Amino acid sequence: MSSIIRPTPRQRTRRLVVLAAALFAIVAPLVQTLTGLGLTQAEFAADGNGTLRVAGYAFSIWGLIYAGILAYAVRQALPQTGESPLLTRMGLPSAVAFFGIGFWIVVAAMNLKAASVAVIFAALLALLLPLLTVSGAVRALPRMDRERLLLVWPLAALAGWLTVAAPLNLITTVTAFGALPTALSPSLWAIVAIVAVTVVALGVTASLRTLAYPLPVAWGLLGAFVAEQAEKPAMAFTALAGAVVLLIAGVLLSFRLRPGVERA
């Protein structure tokens, strides 16, 4: 359960930094869309999507992710929210990740492809690695605990989507530069990427055991299935298989395990 320990001045400053980073992440795409500055995310992704694509509708998940980010950032900034080990550990990493996804909008608008890869992987690792280090505390949280709902779910969901988006960004950029290694065909490279994402996501799901993480990964893989099923069926059905495996594993690991095991 969340602690009732009041935050210190330093911790309150950290909370404001997290809130500012979350607002930046949410406002950046709005400003880019309203002003029309630079490339849109669709235009940026279109250059180099010949190897692997995700259906456009899949990116609508950002609406839910932004809502979760805002809920987390506002809740942790409220004076009545007590400090807890999870808030302390995930505060600065979440701020780095939020700033990263906002900054990605900027570099994508400027068509800085290599920079976009660096930024999105930095955001992913900044969030995912700390989540894994506190996985025991995450597993021990009751299912309806506020910290699970308003900290773990928003951050795990963002990490899940970035687990798909970062490799997609990488393979799109390499394709745009014409630098895809010739050891495999482009379709086989895409299948390798899909399998790698599925394996990594299974490992993280086994550690966190929260459905918030594998759901966005499965959603992204389903988007790849929809986009590629007509022209690249082998790739598409690999993505579909990965999505199904993640959904089944996510449900089993999140709900079928005995809750007392992790608290022992």
Image (cartoon, rainbow, N blue to C red):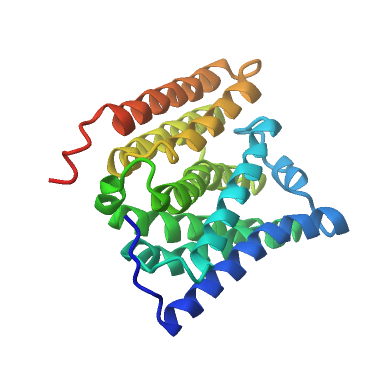
Q: Nearer the viewer, residue 220 or 230?
A: 220
- 91 in relation to 142, above or below: below
> Which of the 4 quarters of the picture holds residue 47?
top right
Report the residue at 42% width, 26% height from top. Answer: 247
Give the x, y percent position of residue 3: 33, 64
Looking at the image, the residue that sits furthest to the right is 35
Give the x, y percent position of residue 150: 47, 51
> Which of the 4 quarters of the picture holds residue 192?
top left
For residue 200, side relative to residue 168 (left or right)? left
Looking at the image, the residue that sits furthest to the left is 264
Q: Nearer the viewer, residue 114 or 214?
A: 214
For residue 184, side relative to residue 44 (left or right)? left
For residue 252, side relative to residue 16 (left or right)? left
For residue 16, side relative to residue 258 (left or right)? right
Quarter of the image for the N terminus: give it.
Answer: bottom left
Quarter of the image for the C terminus: give it.
Answer: top left
